[in-house]
Image (cartoon, grey):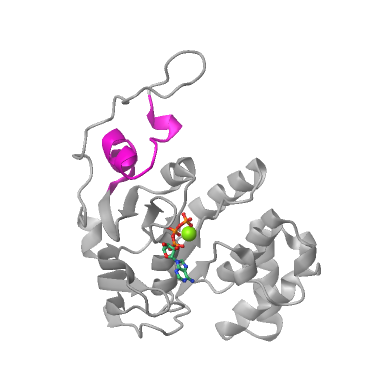
Amino acid sequence: MTFRNVSLLAVEGLAVGHGGGPPVLSGIEFRIAPGERIGLVGPNGAGKTTLLLALTGVLPAAAGGIRLDGRLLALNGFTPEIALVFQQAHDQLFCPTVAEDVAFGARNVGLGGAALDRAVAAALQAVGIASLADRPIHHLSGGEQRLACLAGVLVMSPRILLLDEPSGALDLRNRRRLIELLRGLAQAMLIASHDLELVLELCPRVMLIDDGGIVADGPAAAVLGDAALMAAHGQEIPHSLTRHVGEGHRHPVAGPTARPGKAAVAGA
Ligand SMILES: Nc1ncnc2c1ncn2[C@@H]1O[C@H](COP(=O)(O)OP(=O)(O)OP(=O)(O)O)[C@@H](O)[C@H]1O
Ligand SMILES: [Mg+2]
């Protein structure tokens, strides 16, 4: 695909593990084009969060390189252009109130005074929690905390948005709001999620990771619709890609899109 020739982010031979242990992931290679949205899927423990943490420098990579616009990044450095919404809200939120937490992100990118106030208000408004601005963080529901995390990242206007299970804990209305919000953003995104329908709605491209690496990388419907590939990695074809059988919306054993092992090309 031609868009991959113009890369905003290039990941080259990345290996990353935890606490000096053996790598969870190795030989990770992919590129993200400006504005491209990629779904990152794979079973529990496959390394989705580990990869996102490495891309933001929270978890220093053991080997390889990460380039932004061709510029090699320090493997354990903070790059405000690449921002992560954490899987666990309590890993991200730490200020006394929602507005203060979002303001922390704004200060990170040099905003102050009235510009900071405007940016904080706009970010809270965008995710639909303006009314919670002065609430203590620990008085928020799980879903509200997720939205506060997203506001805290959006306020930095990053060029690449990394989202770790963004729809986790959201009710259907807020999940829909999130999908429409993300759809309307110009940033490139890497979205780690078990919500495969959300991935299908937002991401033209999907990477499937398992067994320490990227096992498939290709068009979303081809990867997620490949029954054999998905089953081999503990996944199911998302409901909207299956041919429904019977009144109970049971999944057929193999859907019409199933083409064992052929749909996606690893490392494409
Ligand atoms: N802090 C840590 N110390 C040691 N090992 C860890 C740590 N965090 C994660 N791991 C291990 O690294 C591997 C990858 O975990 P990771 O959280 O990246 O998976 P994931 O794909 O995000 O899973 P999930 O779908 O459950 O969120 C797992 O084997 C996990 O047990
Ligand atoms: Mg995870």
Q: Is residue 128 visible?
A: no
Residue 108 in the image: above or below residue 162: below
Q: Is residue 111 left or right of residue 196?
A: right
Task: Place residue 6 in its image quadrant.
Answer: bottom left
Residue range highlighted in magenta:
218-242
Q: Is residue 138 left or right of residue 171?
A: right
Number of callouts: 0
Q: Which residue occupies 61% across, 79% down?
A: 106
- Foreground of the two, 198 or 21: 21
- Foreground of the two, 184 or 257: 257
Task: Place residue 141 in its image quadrant.
Answer: bottom right
170 within the magenta span? no
Q: Which residue occupies 70% across, 85% down?
A: 113
Task: Place residue 221 in its image quadrant.
Answer: top left
220 within the magenta span? yes
Q: Residue 222, percent across and down?
A: 28, 39
